Structures are given as C-alpha cells and as structure tokens.
Image (spheres, grey):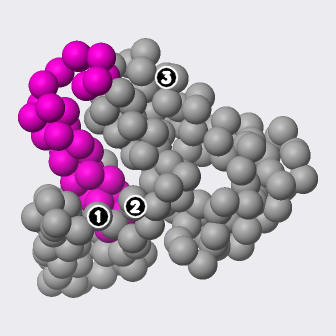
Amino acid sequence: MTNDAPPRWDRMMQQRLARGEAAALGELYDRFASLVHSLAHRVLDDDAAADRITREVFGYVWENPDAYDPKQGSLRSWIAKITHRHSVRRLRQDETRGEGTPEEIEEKVREASAAARADYIVTSMPAPLRAALELAYFRRLDYRQAAADLGVTEDEARRRLRLGLQLLSTAHHSSRSTPPPGYGRAL
C-alpha cells in the first residue's frame, strides 16, 4: 500500500491539473477520495457531510492546482490539509447553527487535529518505518511475520515497529499544542 506519491508524480499531477486535464482529476480522485472521505467523516461523524467535503476538496484542488507547493510536502499531505480545514470549518459552522456545544465542537476539532497529525507523521516517515507499520496495522502481522515480509531480521522489524509507534504516539500529545506544518494557513 502506498501512502504518498513520489514527488515527481506529485509535480506531474499538479501540471496536468493546471492544464485542465479532467483525466488527472479522475486519477487524483481514485487515489485519494477514500482518504478525504475518511478524514472528513472522522471530523464530522456524518456520511452525507463527508461526501460534501469530498466534493468540495476535489473542487478546490481542480480550481487551485497552483496552491500546491511540492516543496512543502506531498500532494497527499496537501489534500489531507485541505480536507482538515474544510471539515473543521464545517464543524464550526454547525456550532453556530446550534448543532453541538462549543466544548463538543472543540473536542471534535482536537480529535481531528490529532488524526490529521497522525496522517502527516505516517506520510512523512521513512519508507522502511511506514512499511513495517502498514504490515502490522493493515495486514495485522506480528513482528516475526513483518520481518519475513520485509526481508529483515526480527530485531530490525521490532525496532522499526517500535520507532514508528513512538513517532505516531506524538500525534495525540502534540496536537493540543502544535499543528502539523502547513496547518492553520488560510486557503
């Protein structure tokens, strides 16, 4: 499972979007729609709202391909940031319409920020750490099975999993004070 695209792919995709290639938007949607929908759903806890956010995010990407700066991170991370912003804005709009107490809304925002930070941490990890975590999480392999799959020693697999989990554990603690890079900038 690939979590982030190579920088070259990101730049080429941005160029294709800038030229108005509808097929590029389709490829981007196929690659990242489930990410966008799941992040939006995590914040809003509402399928219909997550569907709307998904449409909004891809509409924004289509209309503003030049807003993406490959020097700031992967296209996947940028799309996740846009999703987070749109979702939090929708959540806060719901607050003003009386659809939750300010405390409930802010708790959801904190939880969404932690989830977004975790996604950022995972996509920023070196590939060997990310691969070990993916095997453990998505395929539910233990460190022995992950070692065999990765072609490394059991000690190395344990080390990768431990380090990856340590990095990931910082998402919850630091989300209360420091958002991931690029978060908080206006769209």
**Residue of label 2:** 183
| Residue that appears at 17% across and 21% down | 100
Q: Earlier in the sequence, mark 1 or mark 3?
A: 3
Residue bearing the label numbered 1: 179
Q: Is residue 84 left or right of residue 17?
A: left
User: Foreground: 19 or 137?
Assistant: 19
Circle 3 Cα neighbour tier, 10 Å, few/some/many (<14 / 14–19 / ≥20): some
Q: Is residue 134 visible?
A: no
* Residue 77 position within the rendered picture, expressed as x and y whole percent measured from the top left: 48, 60
Residue sitting nearer the eye, 159 or 62: 62
Decide which of tag 2 and tag 3 comes sooner along the chain: 3
40 to the left or right of 96: right
Residue under the image location 39 percent in, 70 percent down: 181
Q: Nearer the viewer, mark 1 or mark 3?
A: 1
Q: CA distance from mark 2 to mark 1?
A: 6 Å
From the image, tell me which residue sits under label 3.
51
Q: At x 73% / y 37%, what residue is drawn?
A: 26
* SS for dot 2: loop
Magenta residues (range):
94-123
SS for dot 1: loop
Q: Residue 71's image quarter?
A: bottom right
Q: Position of residue 165 (x, y in %)?
A: 16, 68
Whether the residues at callouts 2 and 1 have beta carbons within 8 Å, the answer is yes
Cβ–Cβ under 8 Å for marks 1 and 3: no
